[in-house]
Image (cartoon, rainbow, N blue to C red):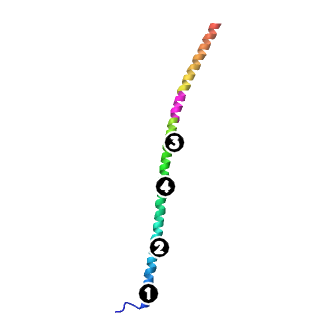
Amino acid sequence: MATGTPDSQARFGQSVKGLLTEKVNTCGTDVIALTKQVLKGSRSSELLGQAARNMVLQEDAILHSEDSLRKMAIITTHLQYHVEQSSNLQDQLNHLLK
């Protein structure tokens, strides 16, 4: 019961060895690609987190600016009132001095 000639067994062994080497290389390439993708995803997640923090900071700055603008509008209204009062007082003084 011969399973084959030594020459065919050697060729079969080389064929199996070649297929195994090819599979190992393919798996290695896949692992490298997967690692790159995970690192890229990790970096994307990091960038998204940083962008979210920046948006929160910008939102706070916008809210602070809106508050400052409201206060400035109130001050402007008060100043306009005082200017009108001063003008009225000046008119009254001019009238009394005549």
| Three-letter code for the amino acid on which mark 4 is drawn | Ser
96 or 63: which is nearer to us? Answer: 63
87 or 17: which is nearer to us? Answer: 17
What residue is at 59 percent from the left and 16 percent from the top? 86
Say whether disc 4 or disc 1 marks the residue closer to the N-terminus. 1
Image quarter in which the C terminus is found:
top right
Given this view, does label 4 or label 1 mark the residue nearer the observer?
A: 1
Say whether disc 2 or disc 3 marks the residue closer to the N-terminus. 2
Helix, strand or loop at label 1? It is helix
| Three-letter code for the amino acid on which mark 1 is drawn | Ala
31 or 84: which is nearer to us? Answer: 31
**Which span is picked out in magenta?**
65-73
Q: Is residue 18 above or below residue 28?
A: below
Where does label 2 land, which residue?
25
In the rendered image, residue 71, in percent from the top left (x then y), is placed at: 52, 29
| The quarter of the displayed image where residue 75 is located | top right
- CA separation in Å, label 4 and label 1: 50 Å
Where does label 3 land, which residue?
58
Say whether disc 3 or disc 4 marks the residue closer to the N-terminus. 4
- CA separation in Å, label 3 and label 4: 21 Å
Given this view, does label 2 or label 3 mark the residue nearer the observer?
A: 2
Circle number at residue 47: none
- CA separation in Å, label 2 and label 4: 28 Å
Where does label 1 land, which residue?
10
Q: Is residue 26 above or below residue 87?
A: below
